[in-house]
Amino acid sequence: MPEFLKLLPPDEALSIWLGALPEPQEFAVETCGTSGALNRVLAENIIASESLPPFSRSTVDGYAVRSADTYGATPALPAYLDLIGEVRMGEHSSLELNPGQAVLIHTGGMIPSSADTVVMLEDTQQARAEQIEVLKAAATGENIIIAGEDVQAGQTVLEAGRILRPQEIGGLMALGHIQIPVRSKPRVAILSTGDELVPPDSPVAAGQVRDINSYSLGALVEHLGGQVSRRVLLHDDRQELQQALQLAHREDDLVLITAGSSVSERDFTAQAIDTLGEPGVLVHGIQIKPGKPTILAAVAGKPVLGLPGNPVSAFVIAGLFLPPVLRRILGVRGDSPSAVITARLTVNISSAAGRVDFVPVRLSNQGDEWLAEPVYGRSNLIFTLVRADGLIRIPPSATGLEQGTQVTVSLF
Amino acid sequence: MPEFLKLLPPDEALSIWLGALPEPQEFAVETCGTSGALNRVLAENIIASESLPPFSRSTVDGYAVRSADTYGATPALPAYLDLIGEVRMGEHSSLELNPGQAVLIHTGGMIPSSADTVVMLEDTQQARAEQIEVLKAAATGENIIIAGEDVQAGQTVLEAGRILRPQEIGGLMALGHIQIPVRSKPRVAILSTGDELVPPDSPVAAGQVRDINSYSLGALVEHLGGQVSRRVLLHDDRQELQQALQLAHREDDLVLITAGSSVSERDFTAQAIDTLGEPGVLVHGIQIKPGKPTILAAVAGKPVLGLPGNPVSAFVIAGLFLPPVLRRILGVRGDSPSAVITARLTVNISSAAGRVDFVPVRLSNQGDEWLAEPVYGRSNLIFTLVRADGLIRIPPSATGLEQGTQVTVSLF
């Protein structure tokens, strides 16, 4: 497809791209321990092998009793119960209560099987060493968390495709799951073409610049749950690009190419992708700024993303298209709400109709509200993004936004 | 301070706590490479040792020319310029342009010193092999990004206390900083008391439960840029707690204790902290639900946080108080806007006035908006949090929120 013959809206482009990718069960699975589990994606449903809590527990400090024994109790007319012992924390209680008896219990303690309620310490008085006065009637089940109230044995507690947050890790620990089946981190190759590029740790001769994209995009890949399998700097050479693409496509799950910004480089990136296999380039050119010359491709079910070479465009486009494709590879379930900041625009921003514009903004706090100030700078300037906190999106229907408009800022 | 003698509002409690902590320069610093730099906190100002870009570059494919030579050029009356060569990517261009001359240049190529503008390829025609027609006048500086436009040598480009996002890592690479000075990850000890607790990988006898908090809080600590230095399960024993606290306080930067939920356990946690040194317990009891029995303490400049033992309260309180204290230890600069989701409440929620309530909610997407549904469940149930996407905060002035109210949800 020749470049820019037809520019697609970003949403349509994304949906064409995702449509060419397989379902996630084809991607690899591994096992990890607790400490590496944060933000990993669960690969299997987790079924509770036991109930939680495993036994009925008191939620207060007090006395486990039979509720019938407290019927009608008031401060003026307390119920007198015999204190027959104490439930020790962490121990099975074999105490049996007969009518008229009570057992001292602590928060979290195991309810004796013959008790059906717990009277709070505050609602009692100790009359003698072996007797308490209950000053208030207690209903059945009061101050008790019953066995299985959190989770029932046999219940599916977590579904494959869940991103593991701290609380999921806590839940897995509660059930004794210390080895957790997770999706392998997608291997992402980052290829950068350009005769002018040198690695950041090399001396830089006149006319050369250090490679930025491999690292800013690499950090984004890590942030999104992927791993950078290789970073390759390529000369503007068809054969070199072709070989690097073939290797990356064979060994990795996702290939990113930052293709330089000259028209010829972009064209031969697209041609090189097409020679890898079917279907090849699906979208070449998007109604978006920055990032118009983006390439979305798939070859034998593996996604290939061709990004503009300049760091701002590459970063904005990667921030837009990498999350959904990595979620697809990882098999993440469901919509994930993405949090935003509401802010007020400090100046007018102009924009062309028919195109989605992303404008980097810097936030500052003024009283109760956030102010968003555009950070202008050409797409070639990485420090434009360093100065910005997030992006605002101007829809294709708008020709700009007025000063004072309330905007939603997606934080980087 | 006896428990609950005076309940403080959360903001006031936090400010008292932070007031007892030293400035961050007292905390440790280390060096990390690129791959471990994401989300670390910069420990020193970074000063650009060179300008970026290091040389003036073309932003388009075209011809580097002298702008005066294009004056008045139109398609009908083009300017004819002699083509004297090509700037190769990644090479120093020693070409000198005399008046009436042009040089082929690619996007990112180095502008010859005697050129002051670049004419886009589209605005030219190649008349003969060694001659081009310029169809449009070009202003000085057009299509050029000048040396130092992004960063000037000697400029402070990043300040100590910055959290390193992918773009900061890109910026550091652009300047050749491959070893990055960062704050050491704060060492956080997590002590959990309770005779009923066993590690998640142990068999569980009747009356025992697996330790959850060490892992859910540990994951939260990691998420917030800390490292878990030790996880210790303690019996309800004064001497054991005292010794563990002393060790953790001596060796770590922050001590978390989940103190069980019985009144006696909470009391002796506070007493044990007080015997560590001055000032000891600063706040014991907060006007908040869940989490009223929280303890905020500092001993010889190190923070100690006493959390309720039940997992929901512990997690909500840790989510509220850990970020600011870890930011303080790490020396993070400035306000960080925290992104939220705006959603509509599906039901009425009641709440007590004079207290800040945090209610876990589950989000679902309906058309263009998010719906927030409270996830009820007692604080003892970890899966309450697993089912929730975030929290809503009900301020002390409110006695509840009505169905349909627009609420802001802080995602976990």
Image (spheres, coloured by chain):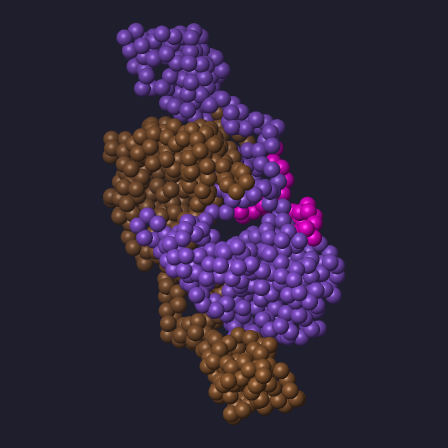
Chain colours: A brown, B purple
Given residues B40 and B89, the one toward you in this image is: B40
Given residues B324 and A368, the one toward you in this image is: A368
Q: Residue at x 42, y 38 (%)?
A: A406
Q: Is residue B210 left or right of residue B154?
A: left
Residue B41 on the magenta span: yes
Q: Residue at x 30, y 6 (%)?
A: B77
Q: Position of residue B3 (x, y in %)?
A: 66, 67
Would residue A111 be seen by someone viewing this image from the given angle? no
| Residue furthest bottom in the image | A98
Q: Residue at x 43, y 74 (%)?
A: A149
Q: Position of residue B29 (x, y in %)?
A: 65, 47
Q: Tell me: residue A65, above or below residue A206.
A: below
Given residues A374 and A248, the one toward you in this image is: A374
Residue A221 on the magenta span: no
Q: Position of residue A105 (x, y in %)?
A: 57, 81
Q: Quadrant of the N terminus of chain A?
A: top left
Given residues B293 and A46, the one toward you in this image is: B293
Q: Tell me: residue A232, above or below residue A113.
A: above
Query: Which range is magenta?
Result: B18-47
